[in-house]
Image (cartoon, grey):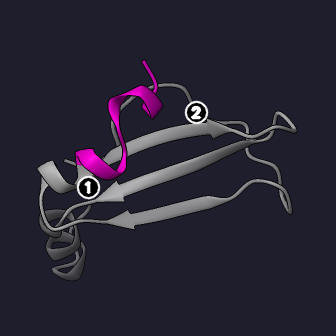
Amino acid sequence: MAAKAIVVDQDNVQHLTIGLNQENIDSLLRGKRFTLPSGPVPALFENKSDIVLLFAESDEDLTKRVPPALRPQ
């Protein structure tokens, strides 16, 4: 499963974190697509917002890096 989290910093700027597991990476390497979980779309700003990619071996490892509290509800 891919994970998505939206984080807001002290200046109220939204940032997007995308977490990918080994299965997602293997799929991309085979030329396939994957879909991020549905939910709110962050309002990203050029030169202000960051997009962070996190990689983990398994869903369990990914969940530790992108805890449910950070994921959109």
Circle 2 Cα neighbour tier, 10 Å, few/some/many (<14 / 14–19 / ≥20) = few
State the residue position of label 2. Answer: 41
Q: Between residues 10 and 12, which one lies in front from this camera angle?
A: 10
The answer to whether residue 2 shows anywhere in this view is: no
Quarter of the rendering occupied by the C terminus = top left
**Type of residue at label 2?**
Val
| Kind of element beneath mark 1 | loop
The answer to whether residue 63 shows anywhere in this view is: yes
Residue 51: image x %, image y %? 60, 59
* Residue 68 magenta-highlighted: yes
Q: Are marks 2 and 1 in contact (CB under 8 Å)?
A: no
Q: Residue at x 56, y 37 (%)?
A: 6
Query: Left or right of 51: which side holds 22?
Result: left
* Residue 64 magenta-highlighted: yes
Residue 69: image x %, image y %? 41, 27
**Type of residue at label 1?**
Phe
State the residue position of label 1. Answer: 34
Distance between mark 2 and mark 1 Cα atoms: 17 Å
Q: Which residues are magenta?
A: 63-73
Q: Residue at x 24, y 65 (%)?
A: 56
